[in-house]
Amino acid sequence: MTDYLIAPSILAADFARLGEEVDSVLAAGADVVHFDVMDNHYVPNLTIGPMVCKALRNYGVTAPIDVHLMVKPVDRIIGDFIEAGATYITFHPEGSEHIDRSLAMIKEGGCKAGLVFNPATSLAHVEHVMDKLDMILLMSVNPGFGGQKFIPQTLEKLRQARKLIDQSGLDIRLEIDGGVGVGNIREIAQAGADTFVAGSAIFGKEDYKAVIDAMRAELAQ
Ligand code: DX5
Ligand code: ZN
């Protein structure tokens, strides 16, 4: 039985009450906090940085924090997120001059490392660094904003990524990010994902537990 993880994206939370929002979503059954970092350079939006990650840790959040860096250049911010208490740090190959070096920095800092692939970016980048990866994250929207529509071609890419992971025999999570909700989570899981980011589908509703329960019910079928 696959161990599925639900990772609400706090991009869609009420930032004025972030600590409470994270508490609520974890109490509602979320496994991981997905933390979207945008720099208004690699992507056309600006969000939150290591200070906010650290603030969540100081507030008492002990759940894994999955830091998704939509940032270029990525290297100079990695150390700050390690210090700030990140659990996973993932970045886009386009954001790094030396992918192997960025992955090594993350691992040496004691965090789990992952690469993120935009809808049109080839999975070829994983080939020579597979043994350094704890996660492969496939974007099912173009990065920069929440609330976009799932790009269906990503299902085939998920199948390819699942095959690569299974063939490697390595313990690598396959995460999906963008346009995920109760209505499509089952087919996304069938295509091979085991970790599901959902922003607007969860924070856009009053009852976070009802949404997460409905997602788990879909995954159990
Ligand atoms: C998009 C972000 C996503 C986003 C997902 O660039 O990486 O994590 O918050 O939001 P929804 O689930 O609303 O598509
Ligand atoms: Zn994200």
Image: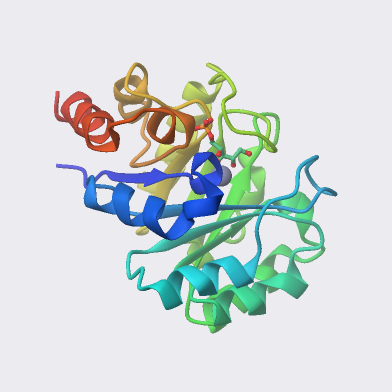
Q: Quadrant of residue 117?
A: top right
Figure check: 96 above or below 28: below
Marker count (numbered): 0
Residue at horizontal 22 percent and vertical 47 percent from the top: 29
Toward the right, the furthest residue is 41
Left/right placement of residue 181 relative to residue 51 reads left
Figure check: 18 above or below 214: below
Q: Nearer the viewer, residue 126 or 140?
A: 140
Q: Quadrant of ligand 2?
A: top right
Is residue 22 visible to us here? yes
Left/right placement of residue 49 relative to residue 158 reads right
Query: Residue 178 location in percent, x, y?
Result: 53, 31
Q: Nearer the viewer, residue 145 or 177?
A: 145
Query: Residue 144 location in percent, x, y?
Result: 70, 38
Query: Residue 80 location in percent, x, y?
Result: 65, 77
Residue at horizontal 37 percent and vertical 28 percent from the top: 205
The quadrant of the rendering that contains the C terminus is top left
